[in-house]
Image: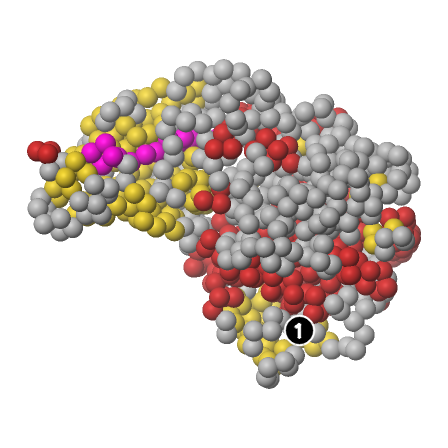
Amino acid sequence: MTLEAHATAAGAGHPRAGRGEPAPGTQVNLAEAIVIKEENVFVICRRDGSLPVGTAHPLGVYSDDCRFLSGHELRLNGVQPRLLVASAAPGSESVHELTNPTLPLAGGRLLPLQTLQLRLVRRVSGECELEETLLVHSYDREPVELELDLLLAADFEPMLAIRGIVEPPPGEPVAVERRDCGVRFAVRGRDGLRRTTTIEADRECGRGGAEASLRFPLTLAPGGEETITLRYELHEGDGQADGTGPRSWPDRRTPEAWLGERTTVVTDDELFNRVLRRSLLDVRMLHSRLGGDGYYAAGVPWYATLFGRDSLIAATQVLAFDPPMAEQTLRVLAKLIGTRDDPVHDEEAGKVLHELRVGEVARLGLSPLARYYGTVDATPLFLCLLCEHADWSGSLSLFDELRGEVEAMLGWIDGPGDRDGDGLLEYRQRAAPGTGLRNQGWRDSDEGVLDERGAPLEPPIALVEPQAYVMRAKRRLARLFALAGDEARARALLGEAHELGQRLKRFWLPERGYYSMGFGADGRLSAALTSNQGHLLWATALPQERAQAVRDAVMSEAMFSGWGIRTLADGEAGYNPVGYHLGTVWPHDTALIGFGLRKYGFDDDFALIFEALLDAASNAEGYRLPELFAGFSRTEFETPVPYPVACQPQAWAAGAIPYLAAGGLGLVPDGLGGRLRVRRPSLPRWLNRVEVSGLRIAGSRVDLLFERAGAGEQVALTDARIDGDIEVVLEISSSREPSAARYWADSG
C-alpha cells in the first residue's frame, strides 16, 4: 500500500499528479520509525535518530504542520555509526544507542568495531525547542582523535505538500547562516512569514564537508568521553529568534507527574500494566493545543492536528482516566462549528469540523482541508460526548454553555444532514473532485464503502452507524433537556430517537442475517459483511434479538482475525488484508464493538476481544497499538502484520485499551444522579486483582478494588472508598439486555 493510497484514504484528497518519482512516504516504514512529541512539536526519525539528507522522505522535526528540520545525520571520521538500540518510552524523549564500525584513524590505524559508544538523547524541551546531547565514550586503550560531523538540512515544507496532497508554488531558497557555535536555516515563506531553525552547540564548531554541517574535533583519552549539547529553536514570524533559552510550558507535567494526576489502574499482571501505561502515555503524547484549549491530535505523523471524529472518540475513550479533556475538546470544536453554506469546504451551519490545518496551506488557501467539514458522523459524536461528560462531571454547566451550538447541531442533523428528507443522515462531497472526501464516515477512503461485488457505492450515501449515533445522542440529550427544565424538548427528542430506531430496520438484510453498512444513490443495500454494524451495539440501538445477530456476524471466523475485528470480512469480493479499510483491523473499531457487546451481555465475546487487543499490543514495539494492522488471521502469523504507513501513535488506537479496561470493570457513571454504577465486572481471565485509584466523578474521588476469588470465578468488587458526595452501586442482574428505562442514564 503506497502513501498515495493512504493519503486518499485518510482524508487528505489526492496526491500530486505528473511526477515520476514516488511520494516521499513510500520510502519509509513507519513501523520502524521513532516518534517523540510534546504539545504541537513532534519528531519522527529513523531508529538511529537520523533524518536522511539529500533524499525525499516524510521524516523530520515538525511544528504546526511545518517541517522545520528535514536532515540530521551523524558521521564519525566520515563514516555513519551503527545502531544498537533505540527507545522513546516517555513519549517526549528518545535515546539512540550507537557504536562505530571499523573506523580509519589518522596515521593509518583502524579503530576496531564497537570501540566507541555514541549516545544521542533527544527531547522536546519547550514550546518550540528541542535539546540534544551527544555523548561519545571510548573503550580503546589508546588515545583517539576523531571528527564528529553533524549533517543538517531544512526545507520548511507543509505536511500536506510532503504527503503529495497539495503542490504549493515554488518558494524562495532556504538560506544557511553560519554561526560560531552552530547554524541557522531561514526562509521567507510563500505566505510572507519568516521561518527559521537555529541550531546552537555548547561549544564552537567548524564547518564539515557540507555548508550546513557542523564539525566537532574530539580527543578521547583511554576510557574518556565528551558530551556535546545542542539546542534547536524553531521560529515563525518576522521577529528574530532570540536564542535566550527554552520557552517551556508553565502547566505541562512530566509523564510521571501526568500519570499521577489521573485515574490509576494497577493489576497483578505486569504485562497488562505496561500496555495500559503505554496507551495512556500515548494519549498524553498526542495532547495538542489550539489557542488556550487542548485536544488530542489524531495521530503522528500524518494527522498531528485536530480531527473532529478522532479527537471526539479519543476523548470519549479516556473519560474515566482524563475527564477534563472531554470538556476542552468540546469547547475547541464548538468554536469551529460550521456557520455558513460553503461547498468548497463541505461546510454547513451546525456541522462539526472534520479537519483543521494551519500554516502556509491554510494562509494561502491551497486546500479546503485547511478547514474541512466533510464528516457525516462528527456532529452526533459531539453530542454523545457532551452527554457522557455530563454523566462524569455531574453538571449541566457545559451543556448550558453550549446550548446554542447543541441546537445548531440538531438543526443540521434534521436539516442539511438529511439531504433527501427520509429521516436519515446522508453525505455527498460538494468540494471539487480531488480536493475533499468522497466518503465521509470513519471509513473515508475512496474504496472503503462498497457493495458485495467490491464496487464502491455512489453518493449520496447513507451509512448505518451515523444513524445509531444520532439515535444515541437524541436519547441521551433528552435527559439533559429534562433536567434543564425543558420537558417538551426532551419528549420530542425521545420520540425522534424512537422513530430513528424504526428507520434502522431499513438496513437489515434478512437473507444475510445482519445489517448492511449502507446504501448509495440507487437505494440498494450493500450486502458486504463489514464491521460498521458493530457500532449499533455501542449505541445500544438494537433490540436483543438483532444484537445477537450482529454479535454472530462480527465474531464469525470471517470477521474476527484473532487479533481484532476486520473492517471487511475475509471472503468478500473487495477483501484485502492490507487494504486501508478493506479487511484490516483498527483497534478503535474493535474496541467500540467490544464495548457494545459488553452492554448487551456478551461478556465472553467482550473478554475475547479485550484479550486479543492486549495480545496485539503485547507483541507491538513498545506495547503501542498502531492506527491499524493487517487483517491476516492469527493462525497465519505469530504477531499482527504491520500496516507500513500506519500512524504510531494514533489517538483512538491509544484509547482502545483504557476504554476496554473501564468497560470491563463495569464503570457506568451517573454523576447527575449522584452515583457510580459498577455493572457486572468482567475482565481477562488472567487478571485476579485490579486496584483503581483517584477515579473522578461529580467532584468526588473514588478508589475501587476488584478481586477474583479463584480460578474460573467472576471478578468481584471487594472494596470502595469515596471522598465526596457520591454513592457506588453494584449492579448484578440476571437480565443483561439494555433496558429502555436505562437509556436515560446508560453512558457506557
Give, as a single range, the part of the protein colored magenta: 65-79
Query: For the point 70% across and 74% down, which residue is it?
Result: 680
Pinpoint residue 65: horizontal percent, then vertical percent. 51, 33
For the N terminus, the image quarter is: top right
User: Is residue 340 covered in magenta?
Assistant: no
Position of 128 compared to 591: left or right? left
Tell which residue pokes out farthest to the front in this image.
Answer: 636
Q: Nearer the viewer, residue 505 or 743?
A: 505
Q: Nearer the viewer, residue 607 or 229?
A: 607
Pinpoint residue 16: horizontal percent, then vertical percent. 59, 22
Query: For the point 60% across and 70% down, which residue is it?
Result: 684
For the C terminus, the image quarter is: bottom right
Pinpoint residue 522: horizontal percent, then vertical percent. 88, 34
* Figure check: 167 above or below 29: above
- Secondary structure category for the residue under label 1: loop
Pinpoint residue 615: horizontal percent, then vertical percent. 55, 61
Position of 409 compared to 279: left or right? right
Position of 117 compared to 107: left or right? right
Say which residue label 1 marks. Answer: 681
Helix, strand or loop: magenta stretch: strand
- Disc 1 residue crowd, few under 14, some 14–19, many 20+, Cα 10 Å: many
